[in-house]
Image (cartoon, grey):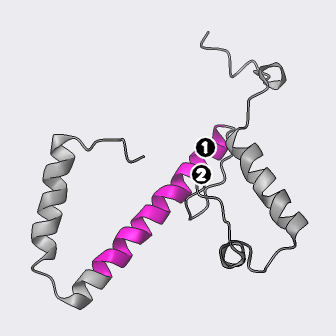
Amino acid sequence: MSDVELTTEQQYLLRQVEVRARQLSREELVEALCNAWEGRLKLKQTFLALSREAGFTFSLVERYPWQPPETEEEFEAILGFVPTEEEANNYLRDLYETATMELDMDEIVLTPDDDAEF
């Protein structure tokens, strides 16, 4: 997502946030940061709920999925335990299959309500 550019308006708003943040105390900054993360997580939950209602399922993990774990410490941080070589390979295979998932258009069935607009 690093290739996505902010609009001029977004850049201006971000600059306003920076100017205002410089005037805040450490406690106010921590509170603002926590509030921002809370808002981000609520947006994520709203997205997941609305997607589920629309028939889509996503698994959004709080990490960078394009950087698969490589060390035992990274696996342990994600899984909560140090996996065996087989478990690690299965996890990496599942990551790959999820990331490269294809839709089976033959399996998608529209109900009369779904195709009423066509």
Q: Is residue 40 magenta?
A: yes
x, y percent for residue 14: 19, 57
Residue situated in front as seen by the camera: 13 or 73: 73
What type is the residue that disc 1 sits on?
Answer: Ser
x, y percent for residue 107: 83, 24
Specify the segment rendered in magenta.
31-54
Q: Is residue 96 above or below residue 87?
A: above
Determine which quarter of the picture holds residue 25: bottom left
Question: In percent of the image, x 41 and y 70: which residue is there?
Answer: 37
Q: Is residue 9 above or below residue 79?
A: above
Q: Quadrant of the C terminus?
A: top right
x, y percent for residue 41: 48, 64
x, y percent for residue 97: 77, 44
- Residue at the spot of label 2: 48
Residue situated in front as seen by the camera: 67 or 43: 67
Q: Residue furthest right?
A: 86
Q: Is residue 2 magenta?
A: no
Q: Of helix, strand and loop, which one carries label 1?
A: helix
Q: Residue furthest top?
A: 118
Q: Of helix, strand and loop, which one carries label 2?
A: helix
Q: Is residue 70 left or right of residue 66?
A: right
Question: In percent of the image, x 12 and y 61: which residue is there?
Answer: 16
Question: In percent of the image, x 68 and y 72: which residue is there?
Answer: 71
Q: Is residue 58 above or below residue 110?
A: below
- Residue at the spot of label 1: 51
Q: Is residue 106 left or right of residue 57?
A: right
Mark 2 surroundings within 10 Å by alpha-carbon count, few (fewer than 14), some (14 through 19), many (20 or more): some
What type is the residue that disc 2 sits on?
Answer: Leu
